[in-house]
Amino acid sequence: MVDVAAAAAAIVRGEVVAFPTETFYGLAVDALNEAALTKLRALKGREAEKAFSLLISGREMLSSLCSEVSPLAERLMAQHWPGPLTLALPARPGLPASIVADGCVAVRVSPHPLAQALVVAVGRPITATSANPAGAAPPRTTSEVAAYFAAPICSILDGGATPGGRPSTLARVRGTQVEILRLGPVVLADVH
């Protein structure tokens, strides 16, 4: 088990770190490090077509990833961040393919204090994929994470048991259009 500073240092070195979120444990790598993203994809056994969603700390990180943030996206962020709403927004050119799907990058601000502290300590966006092999149940405890990925495959930032539940709502926002890609705890009804 590691603390936030050690976890952040591992991510900066290109390593994989498991960390607690408001639902399950996630796996973090530096979202802008191609080699780390490749390592993460292999670890999870995840197909190349599925992009990783990201955690950010705020506006500056958002601007480094997104080419456009519409007034509608701004309103949704103001209402639901930090929280379980992931927004897929138009991506800036030149981002790693592993974090872009259909021209968008999926981002959110986590309300979990350790997840947020980790993003801040790394100083860059981190991945927020669940800490399990593709197709397996997402873990709620560090022992469940360790059963999937024993040391030294990944370090674990222990935040105790997580509550579980549904993954974040995922919505793609382009201009004034919202498309719900995954239903979750945040309900976006009649959004304009």
Image (cartoon, rainbow, N blue to C red):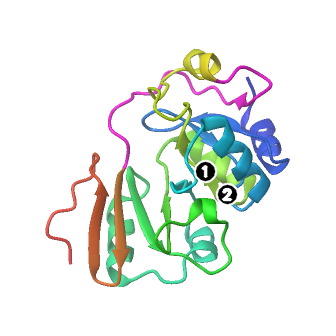
Q: Which residues are magenta?
A: 149-168
State the residue at coordinates (15%, 63%): 189
State the residue at coordinates (37%, 48%): 168
Q: Are marks 2 and 1 in contact (CB under 8 Å)?
A: yes
Tell me which label, 2 or 1, sits earlier in the chain. Answer: 2
Q: Residues within 10 Å of mark 2 (few under 14, many from 20)?
A: many
- Which of the image's four quarters has the C terminus? bottom left
- In the displayed structure, 79 sits above or below 192; it is above
State the residue at coordinates (48%, 83%): 68
Disc number for residue 127: 1
- Quarter assignment of residue 95: bottom right
Q: Seen in the image, is 151 located left or right of residue 92?
A: right
Q: Seen in the image, is 119 located left or right of residue 47?
A: right
Disc number for residue 31: 2
Distance of mark 2 from mark 1, alpha carbons? 6 Å
Give the percent coordinates (x, y) of residue 116. 58, 48
State the residue at coordinates (60%, 38%): 45
Q: Seen in the image, is 47 located left or right of residue 178?
A: right
